[in-house]
Amino acid sequence: MKYKSITYDPEPSTIGVKNGVSQLEFYDHFISEHKNSKKIEEYLIKSDIDFFLNNEQTAKEIDLTGLKGRLYPLANETDLIVFSPMMWGYNYIVSQNFIDSLNEVQVSDEDYTIYRVDIENAQNRNYYLLFIPIIPSNEVDYVNSILYKRLRSNASEKKYITISNFQEYNDLLDDYPFYDFTQLALPSTYKSKHILNIQNHVDLFLSDELIDSLQSKNVTNLVIKKHPKLVIPDHSL
């Protein structure tokens, strides 16, 4: 299976607002009114990544149905909506169009969870918070991955680096925290998944089949990226 990473379009022409990062807010009073407000705060908003990963199953099962949000003035309704505050495992609010594509390519129920939310000033009432489990950094196949050192923007060449394991990756970041992947590899256990969320990588990876389905539905606020390349070798070390 082949993959590409996706992101959203931060331009006002797409999302409507000029902040470039969020179209919608789950305001504090909306969260505090929800039946699971304490768990939302503890597991999804105020926790660090280590706590979240150690309690991911509990976090995934927190029922967010009916959580209220509000679009900012001038924000556009799109099929992918970026929101605030950040919640671990939740990259986007998505429309029914997006869910239809997940069903069309038969994405396993084990690979995502959705909760219908209440966007009080939206015309479309069918929006869902989409949870994708986070693959921990220590599960990345570093032998088949390639990194490069992020230099100043006008640097003429990239310095590519290969490493052997997670410890070497941590050592690199301790020495210089600005490394990006030009190729990212995962073990073969992930080869059948259509949607992947990897720790320390901002964007989701989607299979080409899922992307084709989304594009056939003209899903809005979906940007397909060329890099990094995701590979899942048949025999990872």
Image (tube, helix red, strand yellow):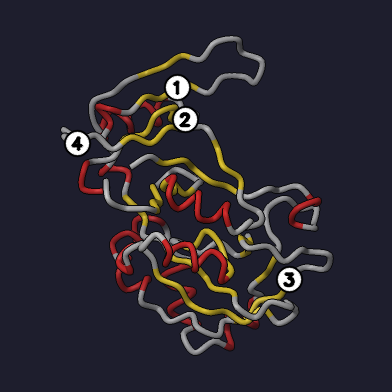
Closer to the camera: disc 1 or disc 4?
4
Label 4 is placed on what type of residue?
A: Asp
Mark 2–mark 1 Cα distance, whole angstroms, equals 6 Å
**Circles 2 and 1: CB atoms closer than 8 Å:** yes
Instruction: Name the secondary structure under disc 3.
Output: strand
Mark 4–mark 3 Cα distance, whole angstroms, equals 44 Å
The disc, 4 or 3, on the residue closer to the chain's N-terminal end is: 3
Task: Residue under label 2, please give it.
Answer: 180
Q: Number of labelled discs?
A: 4
Instruction: Name the secondary structure under disc 1.
Output: strand
Mark 1–mark 4 Cα distance, whole angstroms, equals 24 Å
Q: In the image, what residue occupies the spot 38% across and 36% down?
A: 230
Percent of width and height locating residue 3: 41, 41
Residue 148 shows which numbered tag?
1
Closer to the camera: disc 4 or disc 3?
4
Residue 71 shows which numbered tag?
3
Closer to the camera: disc 4 or disc 2?
4
Residue placed most toward the observer, 177 or 35: 35
User: Circle 3: is it few (<14), some (14-19), or many (20+) Cα within 10 Å?
Assistant: many
Label 1 is placed on what type of residue?
A: Tyr
The disc, 1 or 4, on the residue closer to the chain's N-terminal end is: 1
Residue placed most toward the observer, 4 or 169: 4
The quadrant of the picture occupied by the C terminus is: top left
Q: Quadrant of residue 168?
A: top left
**Circles 1 and 4: CB atoms closer than 8 Å:** no
Residue placed most toward the observer, 162 or 32: 162
Please tell me whether residue 161 is drawn above or below residue 59 in the rendered image.
above
The disc, 3 or 2, on the residue closer to the chain's N-terminal end is: 3
Q: In the image, what residue occupies the spot 41% across and 47% down?
A: 207
Task: Residue under label 4, please give it.
Answer: 234
